[in-house]
Amino acid sequence: MAKIVIMGAGIGGVSLAYELREALSADNDILVVSDSPEFQFVPSNPWVAVDWRKRKDVVIEIEPCLTRKNIGFSSLGVKKVHPQQNQIELNDGSMVDYDYLAIATGPRLAFDEIEGLGPVNGYTESVCHVDHAVSAKEKWDEFVKDPGPVVIGAAQAASCFGPAYEFSFIVDADLRKRKLRHKVPITYITSEPYVGHMGLDGVGDSKSLMESEFRDRHINWITNAKIIKIENGTMTVAECDENGEEKKRHELPFKYSMILPAFTGIDAVREVEGLVNPRGFVVVDDQQRNPTYPNIYAVGVCVAIAPQRPTPVPTGVPKTGYMIESMVAATVKNIRACIAGEQPVAEATWNAICLADMGDTGMAFVALPQIPPRNVTWAKKGKWVHLAKIGFEKYFMRKVRKGDTDPIHEKFILKMLGIEKLK
């Protein structure tokens, strides 16, 4: 019998728990530890921020779902990982033993790295957490009564760009529905060297597609952007050259702003030597195992992935839904192999599939593999992507409620894209 502890109850953590439960015999214990009693479907947060979804539409009380599958749950959260003792310390000071630990927590949101950034101690909104999206919606309600300039984007060292693009288009669409678009200049700022880069060096013709969409929607953009500071109503941004040196400084006025922050690893692992890189992301090998502590696995955004090549202003590499699903599948196979006394050999594919909503249409991107050079790069636009994103939301929420282990990308998104299988 083995005891497996999973840190995190998001897309990666819940999927891993369900798939481990199906793959392992009942005498193996599985415990999920989260800092929240809820599962939240993060991809829908941009809709929450403009009141296209309510909070209740995108969260699920997760303990009853896990209990039905004979999976333990704690919402105390993890204070510290102690890999030498094969223990985690919970926030109440109690210790939990494990034979195998899987870290699937997602990131720490590094609002503190830029003065004035963030919804708590700053002047910008966020869609990285459902509670931030609810707060953003409240500010949006105030904004539309007296509209003005909007600044949306991603800060330097950000590793998730899709929600910023989505929110730019969703804001544009919502304002057009309200007949207010003519009153609102929108500027998109990003650390990417060009729009459509997305931390992936582009996918297909994503640069031209994104520039065309921004032009059609009268959205201005600044690339190679480094946010210097944010004050109430003003954002100071340095536009850098190809060497990362400042070439122009912008003082951008705003009445509403949503900026995605940089990510780091969570506090519980950031100082654990041998487990994480300097930014606190978990270092893993081809089998999703940490080389120093091979009974520790990691999946999702908390995993350290180095960019293939540097950019003038630092950008990170995103971990998309299909990549997370692939990491989960490999981790399940490898933990099962280890319990059986066999050598773990399964590897995640690390391909990328992204459905980006644009309010009334959308873009789909496929990168095989995620980091170039690639076997396949594919980008398409159409209203069907908007509908597919809605379908993805409904499918995954049902999956969480029912405890299904179906690989959603293989069975749903790939069919929508007309792709039989990814290799």
Image (tube, rainbow, N blue to C red):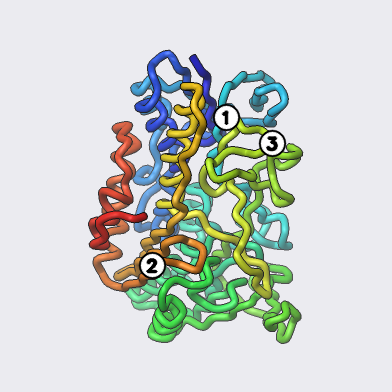
* Numbered label attached to residue 101: 1
Q: Nearer the viewer, residue 233 or 278?
A: 278
Name the residue located 43 percent from the left edge and 59 percent from the top edge.
352
First along the sequence among labels 2 and 1: 1
Q: In 3D space, how far apart are the residues under numbered discs 2 and 1 (Cα atoms)?
A: 34 Å
First along the sequence among labels 3 and 2: 3
Label 1 sits on a secondary structure element that is strand
Name the residue located 55 percent from the left edge and 73 percent from the top edge.
151
Residue 262 percent coordinates (x, y)? 63, 58
Amino acid bearing label 3 = Thr
Q: Residues within 10 Å of mark 2 (few under 14, many from 20)?
A: some
Q: In 3D space, how far apart are the residues under numbered discs 1 and 3 (Cα atoms)?
A: 13 Å
First along the sequence among labels 1 and 3: 1
- Disc 2: which residue: 376
Name the residue located 50 percent from the left edge and 58 percent from the top edge.
136
Label 2 sits on a secondary structure element that is strand
Q: In 3D space, how far apart are the residues under numbered discs 3 and 2 (Cα atoms)?
A: 34 Å
Q: Is residue 127 above or below residue 297?
A: below
